Image: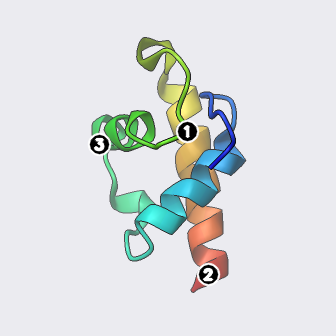
Amino acid sequence: MALELHWTDSEDIAIELCDKFPNQNPLEVRFTDLHRKVIELAGFADDPMASNEGKLEAIQMAWHDEWQDRQ
């Protein structure tokens, strides 16, 4: 992956999460676990402490949309 991911890249993060966890319902993931999954992505290049509830929610909703599209 050539992309650098940042907290505001919710759509790109969602695609990466869907690729890495294809069977995971995103709505069943706690924000603490979502935070860990995001910062562990290969292309993640942002400050791990710069997340907040709004950013995590945007990622979760984008991930859910992507996950539903693949079902």
Mark 3, other Cα within 10 Å: few <14 / some 14–19 / many ≥20: few
Mark 2, other Cα within 10 Å: few <14 / some 14–19 / many ≥20: few
> How far across and how far down the image is residue 48, in percent?
43, 19
Residue 22 relative to residue 4: left or right: left
Image quarter for residue 22? bottom left
Alpha carbon separation for disc pair 2 and 3: 22 Å
Q: Residue at x 62, y 50 (%)?
A: 1
Q: Residue at x 31, y 45 (%)?
A: 30
**23 w.r.t. 40: above or below:** below
Q: Which residue is mark 2?
A: 70
**60 w.r.t. 70: above or below:** above
> How far across and how far down the image is residue 17, in percent?
50, 56
Q: Which residue is mark 1?
A: 43
Alpha carbon separation for disc pair 2 and 1: 22 Å
> How far across and how far down the image is residue 71, in percent?
57, 86
Residue 45 relative to residue 65: left or right: left
| Pointer 2 or 1: first along the chain | 1
Q: Amino acid at mark 3?
A: Asp
- Give the colour scheme shown: rainbow
Image quarter for residue 39? top left
* Foreground disc of the pair 2, 1: 1
Q: Amino acid at mark 1?
A: Gly
Say which element carries label 3: helix
Q: Which residue is mark 3?
A: 33
Image quarter for residue 70? bottom right
